[in-house]
Each structure stands twice: as structure tokens, then as C-alpha cells.
Amino acid sequence: MLNTMYSKIRKLVDPNKWYKPREIATLNFILPIKGIEAKGKYDYVTKLIRLGKLPAKNRSTGKICPHWVVKGSDILDFIKDL
């Protein structure tokens, strides 16, 4: 089942594009799994980033409010490793 999900998402994700956490959650690239408490899909994606499980770059200029972006290839790697 995970292989079919991975192959479907692989067709949708551009490995060279940078995605915002909101886009990842809206497009259902990464769905919550047990083990990490989250209020919703967006919260789950941001928790993965903060925990270091999903590589991301902080594009903000300040330290108070991070502006995370995730490369499509990192999304594919994360899903592949599930």
C-alpha cells in the first residue's frame, strides 16, 4: 500500500521545487501517522520539520517566526523511508 501511495505522490511532487508546509499539508503529500501528536496535517508537517525528521530551510530573516520551505526531493525521500 505504501508503494502505491509513494508512486502516486512521486508523480505529483516536483523534486526541484520548494514547497511550503501549508502546500505539503493541502496537497496531502505527507499524512499524519501514529507516534507524533498533531492537531492537523499542517501542524504535523511543521512538527516533523522542528523535530528534524523532514529536512527544511528557514527562509525568514528573523528568528521569531520561521518561514520553512522543503525541497520536493526531501519530501520524496521522507515518504520513501516510511
Image (tube, grey):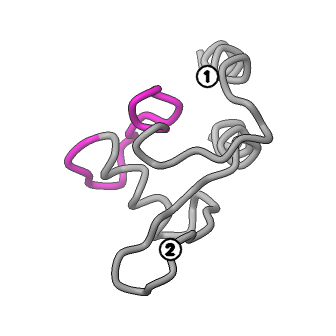
Residue at position x 60%, y 18% from top?
5
Specify the amino acid type for callout 2: Ser
Q: Residue 7 at what x, y percent from top left?
A: 72, 17
**Distance from label 1 to label 2 (Cα)?**
34 Å
- Give the residues in magenta: 24-40
Residue at position x 76%, y 43% from top?
73
Seen from the viewer's position, the closer of residues 60 and 41 is: 60
Seen from the viewer's position, the closer of residues 21 and 55 is: 21
Residue sticking out furthest to the bottom = 63
* Mark 2 surroundings: few (<14), some (14-19) or many (≥20) residues within 10 A: few
The residue under label 1 is 2
Q: Residue 46 at what x, y percent from top left?
A: 40, 58
Dividing the picture into quadrants, the one containing residue 72 is top right
Is label 2 in a helix, a strand or a loop?
loop
Is label 1 in a helix, a strand or a loop?
helix
The residue under label 2 is 60
Does residue 79 appear left or right of residue 46 in this picture?
Answer: right
Work out whether 12 lies above or below 32: above
